[in-house]
């Protein structure tokens, strides 16, 4: 067989490039993307150079909410590239950053009005945690240095982020002695939990907070839906409990909406239901075009930070407020709000729910759950990712299952026929994986 240009690229990639959570020395296969448009990716496996179009079920890890090559986002990016692509944010500012800041202040709940533009989700979580520590110092409580969180969470891959991620998911055993030691409560009960289960969870969290209050700076959670830690939607009542606990013990409440923000759960932000003191946004913030994150907080927190001994927030990434990313983010927000995003998310969710329901009785399936534009099938075993991916691609769908989960969270531009294809792809992945 003759080697194609695709083979050459894939060979070099296999020998030299790390992929997420993948062995460098015995890697699982990767495929070459040769194009992307709307809710489709063109993927080549080596035998063909061009590749074939498949429906994308992943939105490039929650981010490409408008799909690919959207003319409005393409134009925003090109227009800003024509002006300037980047300048430092120390001592300088620009219209793209101000425009994005204005939008974020407007569309997030009222008390959230101070914006820190970070360059990735993990960095925004680091900044949020640092804000909490500096705020407590500024308020005369420097001994409050630990975080309260829940099992099953995911907050990113840097060390402080790992410390508040689920101990198993965050590999705490491997990093013992290196990670800050945080306080973990039980995983919040499911969205359809009984009042008794809710009360038991609330009781445990209140007890834990009371016991550790003297050393706690903040509570951090992904609100309503735990993402990479298990695609677990939970009861909104849990967020109210956390708000009460935070107020009672003078802890900051941090919502990590890096995955849930911008409509994915059916709410523009879950923070509309319960207001945090600090909100982290990322992933879909720049429409999946560029890496960008934001931390939005209150005037009260900003004042606490300013009262700490440094007088300033001790953080400032090189690419803070990157103009290209900010310009695309503003265009993405305008695009989202100009369309009936809630209707689209609901339509996708309803169709995913109906399509996936029959899988409840499929062999090896323990649960099927949907929330917003997210559909999840949980198996009774670890998914064979290679086999499941292969089966999904054969059905014309791109999926990236993990652990015991096969799931989809498609771009909001995905139409009914394409959702049906996703359902078929998930079914194929479930039976193969
Ligand atoms: C993806 C994610 C992060 C990390 O964001 P990166 O941009 O990958 O650093 C943090 N928190 C949550 C909830 C996420 O889903």
Image (tube, grey):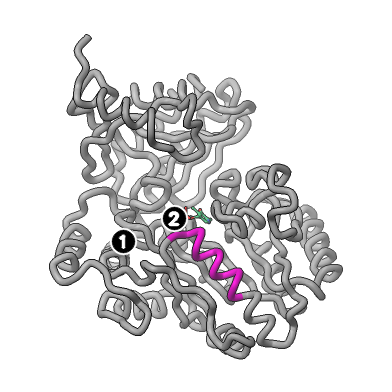
Residue in view at x 45 percent, y 75 percent: 116
Query: Badge 1 local density, few (<14 within 10 Å), some, or many (20+)?
Result: few
Q: Dominant secondary structure of the magenta stretch? A: helix
Q: Is residue 202 above or below residue 62?
A: below
Residue in view at x 74 percent, y 83 percent: 141
Earlier in the chain: of badge 2 and badge 1, it is: 2
Callout 1: helix, strand or loop? loop
Residue at which label 2 appears: 264
Q: Nearer the viewer, residue 411 or 349?
A: 411
Q: Position of residue 298 (x, y in %)?
A: 54, 82
Q: Nearer the viewer, residue 354 or 69?
A: 69
Residue 132 visible from this viewpoint: yes
Callout 2: helix, strand or loop? loop
* Marker disc for residue 340: 1
* Marker disc for residue 180: none
Name the quadrant containing residue 369.
top right
CA distance for labels 2 and 1: 13 Å
Please state if 173 lies on the left or on the right of 162 as rendered: right
Residue in view at x 53 percent, y 84 percent: 312
Badge 2 residue CB within 8 Å of ligand 1: no
Q: Nearer the viewer, residue 42 or 317?
A: 317
Q: Position of residue 140 (x, y in %)?
A: 73, 87
Name the quadrant containing residue 3.
top left
Residue 188 visible from this viewpoint: no
Magenta range: 120-131
Q: Position of residue 388 (x, y in %)?
A: 46, 24
Q: Position of residue 261 (x, y in %)?
A: 45, 61
């Amino acid at each position: 067989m003759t080697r194609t240009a695709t083979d050459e690229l894939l060979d070099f990639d296999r020998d030299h490039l790390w992929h997420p959570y993948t062995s460098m020395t015995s890697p699982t296969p990767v495929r070459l993307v040769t194009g992307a448009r709307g809710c489709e990716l063109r993927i080549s496996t080596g035998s063909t150079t061009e590749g074939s179009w498949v429906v994308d079920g992943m939105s490039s890890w929650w981010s490409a909410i408008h799909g690919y090559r959207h003319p409005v986002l393409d134009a925003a990016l090109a227009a800003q590239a024509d002006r300037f692509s980047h300048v430092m944010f120390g001592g300088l500012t620009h219209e793209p950053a101000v425009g994005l800041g204005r939008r974020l202040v407007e569309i997030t709940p009222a008390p959230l009005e101070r914006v820190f533009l970070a360059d990735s989700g993990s960095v925004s979580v680091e900044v949020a945690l640092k804000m909490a520590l500096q705020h407590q110092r500024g308020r005369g409580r420097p001994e409050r240095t630990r975080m309260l969180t829940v099992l099953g969470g995911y907050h990113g891959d840097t060390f402080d982020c790992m410390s508040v991620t689920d101990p198993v998911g965050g590999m705490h055993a491997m990093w013992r002695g290196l990670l800050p030691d945080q306080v973990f409560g039980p995983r919040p009960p499911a969205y359809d939990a009984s009042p008794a289960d809710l009360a038991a969870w609330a009781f445990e969290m209140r007890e834990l907070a009371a016991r550790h209050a003297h050393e706690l700076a903040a509570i951090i959670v992904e609100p309503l839906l735990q993402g990479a830690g298990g695609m677990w939607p939970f009861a909104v009542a849990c967020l109210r409990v956390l708000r009460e606990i935070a107020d009672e013990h003078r802890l900051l409440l941090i919502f990590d909406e890096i995955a849930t923000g911008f409509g994915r759960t059916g709410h523009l932000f879950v923070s509309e239901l319960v207001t945090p003191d600090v909100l982290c946004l990322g992933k879909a913030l720049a429409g999946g075009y560029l890496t960008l994150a934001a931390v939005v907080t209150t005037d009260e927190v900003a004042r606490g930070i300013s009262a700490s001994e440094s007088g300033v927030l001790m953080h400032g990434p090189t690419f803070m407020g990157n103009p290209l990313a900010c310009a695309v983010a503003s265009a993405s927000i305008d695009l989202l709000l100009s369309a009936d995003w809630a209707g689209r998310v609901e339509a996708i969710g309803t169709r995913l729910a109906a399509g996936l329901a029959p899988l409840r009785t499929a062999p090896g399936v323990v649960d099927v759950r949907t929330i917003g534009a997210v559909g999840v099938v949980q198996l009774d075993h670890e998914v064979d990712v290679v086999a499941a991916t292969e089966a999904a691609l054969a059905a014309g769908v791109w999926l990236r299952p993990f652990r015991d989960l096969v799931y989809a969270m498609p771009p909001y531009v995905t139409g009914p026929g394409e959702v049906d294809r996703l359902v078929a792809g998930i079914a194929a992945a479930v039976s193969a994986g």
